[in-house]
């Protein structure tokens, strides 16, 4: 028997005039008769980190039962379609976010400690110092195999970059969850167009990019001919994958363009001044950013992404779910049942939006599984009880199979004050980035997973 089938390199691109588009994992990238684990089809491990502020209504978050037989709590109920791919972890704490004599500033400390386990230095401007975060530690290793080491996204304006934002703490501490070094916070991008251009387009300033959008056709138009040639050489399964992927890219492009038209007044003349390319509705904005993250994972442009869903002390209201008051003020509910119900409503809505991302990852094929099967998505925040500014019993959820490294569909309860940094150590180890310790970790967290056999 003679087998002459050739395989495409995993890092295959479609190229056009000033445009380069990565491709998703195709069957043609796996050599004939090769074991999946020994080829380009070996699943890449991906990491996602999503931060929610102002604590959680804990008794509506933590499931009543422990182990596989748990039922989703009221706040987690929107995740029913992916329940078997979840790990809910309770009892974890970030004690390095406590005051230690620095006074108030729990919002800033909660944010900067979340992915580092390091107590930040209290300063209003110069001399900021926290800890290198695990997303950037992972990016240094996993980024060797991708065009972008990591992707940092946010849903609220980052206008306040100078001065103090929380009781003597510089705004840098609440504007990002990513720190490249202890003194170098990583800016988080709020503009979908900027993210899209970083993933698929050329560089330039924001003004230049917007001008290019108005003058040029879609990125797909410039690679259309090469895509057509490639399709002729692929099998039917791969042709379907490429078509679906290009359709997804086109859909994101068109939605960004519609948002830009709205923002520039082309569709509405009564809009106030605001940045271009950000959809008017929060839900449209976050779904668009989630779609970009899925595309980045699918095309293997990056394997590490982090998102600040909202900043601590967020003044965002949610009239679409009947909550008119600002998020932060509601978090200080003072045990008022009416305010507790509204805060739980916000918490549930945020989880519902997380469900959009997880279901999309779960529906996107990747090698012998889905993107969700080969990812670990950490969702949570640096505060447990937002009313009391406590950094114990944090909301912690890990979604995805970690490329076979996680046993999901369980609620794992740990002794009170177990360092959350132990979870960070374990996640990096399962992603193939063993570090031994992070922040105040005391060792890896037992998550019931199989040991990592190869890195």
Image: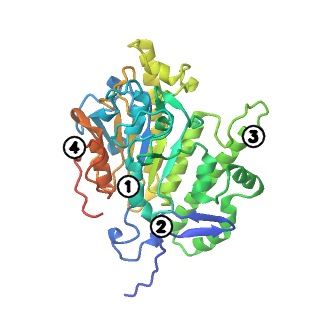
Disc 1 to disc 3, how far (Cα)? 39 Å
Name the side, left or right, on which 448 lies relative to 211: left
Mark 3 or mark 4, which has the lower sequence index? 3
Disc 3 to disc 4, how far (Cα)? 52 Å
Measured as percent of width and height from the top left, residue 160 is found at 57, 34
Residue assigned mark 1: 374
Disc 1 to disc 4, how far (Cα)? 27 Å
For the residue labelled by badge 1, is the local secondary structure a helix, a strand or a loop? Answer: loop
Q: Nearer the viewer, mark 2 or mark 3?
A: 3
Residue assigned mark 2: 26
The relative height of residue 206 versus residue 28 in the rendered view (above or below) is above
**Count of numbered badges drawn on the protein:** 4
Q: Are marks 1 and 2 in contact (CB under 8 Å)?
A: no
Mark 2 or mark 3, which has the lower sequence index? 2
Name the side, left or right, on which 127 lies relative to 63: right
Mark 1: few/some/many CA within 10 Å (<14, 14-19, 20+): many
Disc 4 to disc 2, how far (Cα)? 41 Å
For the residue labelled by badge 3, is the local secondary structure a helix, a strand or a loop? Answer: loop
Name the side, left or right, on which 345 lies relative to 425: right
Disc 1 to disc 2, how far (Cα)? 16 Å
Residue assigned mark 3: 264
Looking at the picture, tell me which residue is in the foreground, 455 or 149: 149
Residue 265 lies in quadrant? top right
For the residue labelled by badge 2, is the local secondary structure a helix, a strand or a loop? Answer: loop
Q: Residue furthest bottom?
A: 2
Looking at the picture, tell me which residue is in the foreground, 285 or 116: 116
Q: Nearer the viewer, mark 1 or mark 2?
A: 1
Disc 2 to disc 3, how far (Cα)? 39 Å
Mark 4 or mark 2, which has the lower sequence index? 2
């Amino acid at each position: 028997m003679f087998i002459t089938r050739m395989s495409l390199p995993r890092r295959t691109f479609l190229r056009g005039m000033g445009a380069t588009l990565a491709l998703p994992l195709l069957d043609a990238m796996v050599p004939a008769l090769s074991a999946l684990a020994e080829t380009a089809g070996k699943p890449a491990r991906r990491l996602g980190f999503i931060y929610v502020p102002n604590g959680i209504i804990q008794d509506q978050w933590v499931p009543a039962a422990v182990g596989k037989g748990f039922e989703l709590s009221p706040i987690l109920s929107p995740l029913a379609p992916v329940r078997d791919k979840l790990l809910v972890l309770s009892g974890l704490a970030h004690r390095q976010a406590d005051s230690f004599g620095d006074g108030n500033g729990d919002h800033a400390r909660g944010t900067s400690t979340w992915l580092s386990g390091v107590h930040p230095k209290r300063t209003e401007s110069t001399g900021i110092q926290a800890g290198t975060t695990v997303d950037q530690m992972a990016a240094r290793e996993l980024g060797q195999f991708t065009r972008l080491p990591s992707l940092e996204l946010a849903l609220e304006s980052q206008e306040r970059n100078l001065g103090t934002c929380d009781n003597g703490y510089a705004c840098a501490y609440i504007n990002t969850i990513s720190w490249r070094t202890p003194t170098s916070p990583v800016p988080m991008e709020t503009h979908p167009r900027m993210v899209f251009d970083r993933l698929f387009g050329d560089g330039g300033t924001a003004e230049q990019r917007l001008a290019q959008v108005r003058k040029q056709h879609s990125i797909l138009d410039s690679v259309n001919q090469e895509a057509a040639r490639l399709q002729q050489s692929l099998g039917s399964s791969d042709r379907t994958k490429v078509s679906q992927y290009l359709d997804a890219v086109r859909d994101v492009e068109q939605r960004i363009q519609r948002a830009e038209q709205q923002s520039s007044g082309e569709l509405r003349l009564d809009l106030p001044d605001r940045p271009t390319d950000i959809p008017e509705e929060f839900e449209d904005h976050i779904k668009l950013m989630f779609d970009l993250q899925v595309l980045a994972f699918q095309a293997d442009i990056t394997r590490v992404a982090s998102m600040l869903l909202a900043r601590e002390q967020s003044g965002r209201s949610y009239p679409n779910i009947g909550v008119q008051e600002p998020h932060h003020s509601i978090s200080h509910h003072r045990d008022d049942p009416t305010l507790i119900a509204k805060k739980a409503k916000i918490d549930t809505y945020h989880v519902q939006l997380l469900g959009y991302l997880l279901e999309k990852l779960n529906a996107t094929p990747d090698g012998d599984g889905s993107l969700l099967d080969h990812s670990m998505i950490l969702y949570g925040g640096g505060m447990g009880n937002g009313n009391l500014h406590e950094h114990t019993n944090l909301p912690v959820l890990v979604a995805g199979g970690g490329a076979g490294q996680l046993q999901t569909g369980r609620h794992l309860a740990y002794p009170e004050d177990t360092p959350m940094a132990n979870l960070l150590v374990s996640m990096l180890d399962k992603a193939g980035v063993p570090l031994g310790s992070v922040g105040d970790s005391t060792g890896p967290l037992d998550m019931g997973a199989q040991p990592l056999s190869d890195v």
